[in-house]
Amino acid sequence: MNRNQPIALALILAIVALAFLIPLETPERVVVALALISAICWTLEPIPIPLTALGLLLALPVSGVTTFESTFAAFGRPAVWLVFSGMVISQLITETKLGDILSSLIASRLKHSAAFILELSLFGVLLALLIPSGVVRVLIALPVLTALIDALKAERNSPLSAAIVLSVVCATYYGGTGILTASVPNLVIMGVLEGQGHSVFWAEWAGYVFPVIGLLRVLAGALVIILLFRPKLPDHPNLPSSPFEFGRREAKALGLLLLGVAGWATDAIHHIHPVVIGLGLSILCMAPRIGPLNADHLRKVNYPIIIYVGSVFALGDAFVASGASERLAEAFAAWLDLADRPVFMQLAAISYAVTPFNFLVDTAVVGGVLTPPLLSLGAVSGLTPLQVGLSVAVGTGMVFMPYQGAPFMIAYAYGYATMRQFVLTMMLICLVNLIVLVPLNLVYWKCVGLY
């Protein structure tokens, strides 16, 4: 028996018992309970993560919260197909020698473990600048990282293995909060602001959010990982004997990868949706005489993680359809009192109060649901839409558990770091964020004239 099963069962029974005390209508009560139960199962893993996702997809229509059609309509979301296309594209690295070549180039620069983790973290930030989708960033980076781990003779789940994976994944996810196009919640919040007539520009967002909540948080995360795992590099890494011998397949793979990065990096110019670029690139990967892959490689796609991603979106849609999100937003706005407080305290209250909602549903849903009532609440207190929107973004950028962000779950599925290592690292980074970086960011906002 999994040692977490008794703990998970006790928590689930407690949630079921407490669900009857929640002052909500039955559908709203059910969807909140399902969200909490799913969060427990995805974190403690009393059963496999895909099985929990399937159970959630079954429970939503059976309980009457949503219909079968609306539940599975979540699999038509662009983000789900972006995950699929990212997995196909990542096979350009795993099914050719490109992963060994890139990992050997990285390994050739190894000198000091702390500097190495820092460089990997900055590499994660660079990916966030170039590629808008966090899922695709992770799916492209992980094959290279796993090849690097194998070259360094590191065991799975070892301190070195975990440090390498977490340094890039945490950097590219948390750093993405400071880049408008690198985080889905950012885009959702921007959409809400623009829908109310308040435009937000890429450079404006980066100027206010990236220095502290982006770059400084990435550096703090790298320090946390170094102190937590104390990774040690081997003296003689197992590098490929001929790392620079490109074949035709490797040349095709690299060309297609660069084509994809160029397409995603210039989406502000051509306005083609990232999923369209991803699916088009997936076809080119398997096209005769063009790509190094074939249709048989579709069998190697990690379909269970796609089921998980779809279930997360289905849960978010159920929150909206049942009315639970609206009720929670109304109660939240009524509870949060911003009147007669300094602006520093008002903006801090918004960021801190938004954070707990990330445990219930996808952070993009949190941004979409809470931003409108907070804009109204902020206007009464004299806050500008930009001040409120950026504060909400800071709150939605804090995820403590892998299930709260699909890129973390995808990285976890590779099996090079344990759930405990993920949770401990993410919690420490977010605690540093809550205690140090959020107040520091508010001081920075005052210095640059946001308030």
Image (tube, rainbow, N blue to C red):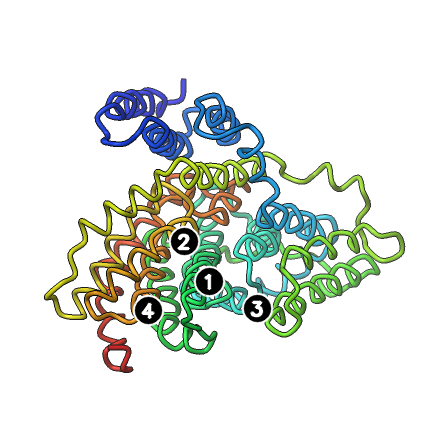
Residue picked out by circle 2: 368
How far, Cα to Cα, is label 1 from label 4? Answer: 12 Å
On residue 130, the disc is 3
Other residues around mark 2 within 10 Å, as few (<14) / some (14–19) / many (≥20): some
Q: Nearer the viewer, mark 2 or mark 3?
A: 2
Q: For mark 1, give the secondary structure.
A: helix
- Residue type, numbered disc 2: Gly
- Residue type, numbered disc 3: Leu
Other residues around mark 4 within 10 Å, as few (<14) / some (14–19) / many (≥20): many
Q: Residue furthest top?
A: 1
Question: Is residue 356 or residue 429 the one in the foreground?
Answer: 356
Q: Which residue is drawn at 26% across and 76% down?
A: 444
Sequence-first disc among 1 and 3: 3
**x and y, in percent, of residue 7 in the image:** 30, 24
Sequence-first disc among 3 and 4: 3
Q: Nearer the viewer, mark 3 or mark 4?
A: 4
**x and y, in percent, of residue 449 in the image:** 27, 82
Residue picked out by circle 4: 385
How far, Cα to Cα, is label 1 from label 3? Answer: 21 Å
Q: Work out whether 287 lies above or below 348.
A: above
